[in-house]
Amino acid sequence: MVLNPFKSFIVVALLLSSLASADDQNSSLVNADKAVYVNLLKSIKESKIANDEIALQKVLLEKLINTQPSTITKVPVNIPETIDEYSNLFNRYNDNALRKVSLDKKVNSIALKIKTLEKEIKSLDNNSTSVRTLQLQNALYTKSLQEFKDQSEALASEMLSIEKMLTESLKNIPFDPENQVKKTASNREDALKLRTTIDNFLVKKERFELLGDNLDRGVSAATISAKEEAYAKALRATMTSLFLEFSNALKSKNEKAFALEKSILDEGALLDSTGVMNESMASLLHAMEKKYFGTLDTITGSTTQEFKNIVKSTWNMLSEPIFTANGTPITTLKLILALFIFLIGVFGGGFYKTSIKKIANNSKSINLATRTILANMGYYVILLAAFFIALNVLGIDLSSIALVAGALSVGIGFGLQNIVSNLVSGIILMFERSIKIGDFVELSGTVRGHVTDIRMRSTTLNTNGNIDVIVPNRNFIEGNVINWTMHDKIKRFDIPFGVAYGTKPEHVIAVIKEAVVNSGYSDIIEAHDRFTNVIMTGMGSSSVDFLLQVWIHGEEILAPSKTMSRFLIIIYNTLNAHGIEIPFPQQDVHIKSSDEKSALALFQSQPKHIEERPEASEASQI
């Protein structure tokens, strides 16, 4: 018969009345003995309450009643006398380490659950029926936690005993070093084969699953599991063999023991990926090393071995391929070495250029242009050689580079033709020497200046305004270039001017030539084939046109605007001194109008310098 909710609440309240608070109930249930759980279960059954909370409490109480006190059976550990007993003791240490790892995981998991339950219990009312359920569950967890802790502590104690026995019995164990090395190699080979087999099985199984084939095909989960167990046994056998080698090295105080320690820990990492077992293993190995080498030598040896391990790990990492180029694996080490060689080429080329400049400055036989060609060409040769050596270090076949270059030739022809053209033009300029460093050149009447540098792609011009102009080399090959100083620094300047009609040309020529000759400028050349001359060039619309031809030598030719200004001033002052009129453009205005007043007003509005001519007056009469 099921009680109504009110009666159920009364019964549960009576069950809880013996305890004062939630914390007291928790402590009482955790520390209670089996009789308390039996009485509680009996009371609940007699209450005839039937709901989920009561049912869960019954299950929890039954589990608490059936939980036996934690009893740990200690298997006696005997001091080993033979190599087999010594090996078995080491394996027992490893088994204990693995079991302890598992127990510690359970302890951590249950501890988190207990914290969660305690928070939930505190958040509920003490009179709630859910509180008793959570308290019973907490009691069950607490007893399990204590049991796992006791087992873990017992294992830790046994491991300390084993560590002491292994250390002390080492000197009495007879070892067979040669046979042990062979056994280690054999165990490693077995483990490697099993690992390869497992990987192949996994690949096959995945392939069959992708094809929708769920048949066994010899790669079932059971088969793979069996192989993995065999693989774990092979790893443990390898660890045991290495430990025997390690023990023999300790016995003879051979520093090889530190390297063997690293090998043992590496195998342990494969067996336990969490690394917890390796902590116990490292503790055992270090304790044995301190016993036979001493603390100082152990620290020194461990540090040296650790440094070797770091170097080895770094080397392996650098030797690991990061990508493949044309079928050739490229490693980080190769990249670093290739970059180092290329940087040596860059700095070596820079040192070469600096050395050439110093030699040229101290030698009178090497001019600026020759120095630049030697410096630039040598620099690019060194750079190119370093580049090809770097490619060779990377392991890239130069013939494959030629094939790639041939494949890219079409793209270069269309996309990079200007760059290639400039590079070829730069080489031509360096060898042809039609333009040299220090020459004063003019391009298309718009850009002119001194050549300060000739590189593979471009040439630098420094104008008289101290502006550096970077000109692509192809402009010097494909276009017209005026080199003012190619062979010498002599140039004829042609200065045009005009005089008014009515002036005798002979008189103009005579006074201008005389003025130039008497100007006192020392850079004017007067020779039988190069002399100052004035010629009449035409009769313009408003002036008679002349041209002063004067030969100049020296640095002044490199400042053409300044030189032209000098002679224009001479011409102006001479014409003005001799009363020769310098004309200006004039305009004739022809007006057709029937209204004379309008024509007159329009004429008066024009600028004063417009001259009225007879034909204009006649036109106004039309």
Image (spheres, rainbow, N blue to C red):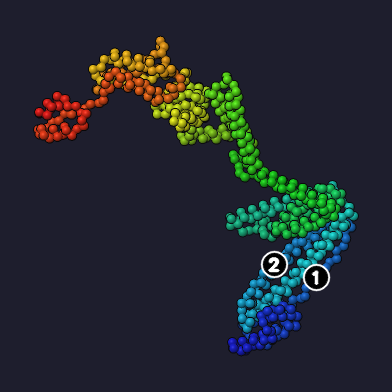
Residues 127 and 574: in front is 574
Q: Residues within 10 Å of mark 1 (few under 14, many from 20)?
A: few
* Residue 183 shows up from this direction: no
x and y percentages locating residue 338 in the rendered image? 63, 37
Residues 422 and 494: in front is 494
Of the 4 image quadrants, the one containing the C terminus is top left
Location of residue 146 (image quadrant): bottom right
Looking at marks 1 and 2 on the same chain, the residue that comes earlier in the sequence is marked by 1
Element marked by disc 1:
loop
Residue at figure coordinates x 80%, y 72% from the top left: 71
In this rendering, the label closer to the viewer, 1 or 2: 2
Q: Residues within 10 Å of mark 2 (few under 14, many from 20)?
A: few
Q: Which mark is residue 508?
A: none
- Against 181, residue 11 (above or below) is below
Q: Is residue 435 left or right of residue 102?
A: left
Identify the residue position indicated by label 1 in the image.
72
Q: Which mark is residue 108?
A: 2
Residue at figure coordinates x 25%, y 26% from the top left: 585
Location of residue 563 (image quadrant): top left
- Against 517, residue 412 (above or below) is below
Q: Residue furthest front?
A: 577
Q: Is residue 221 left or right of residue 599?
A: right
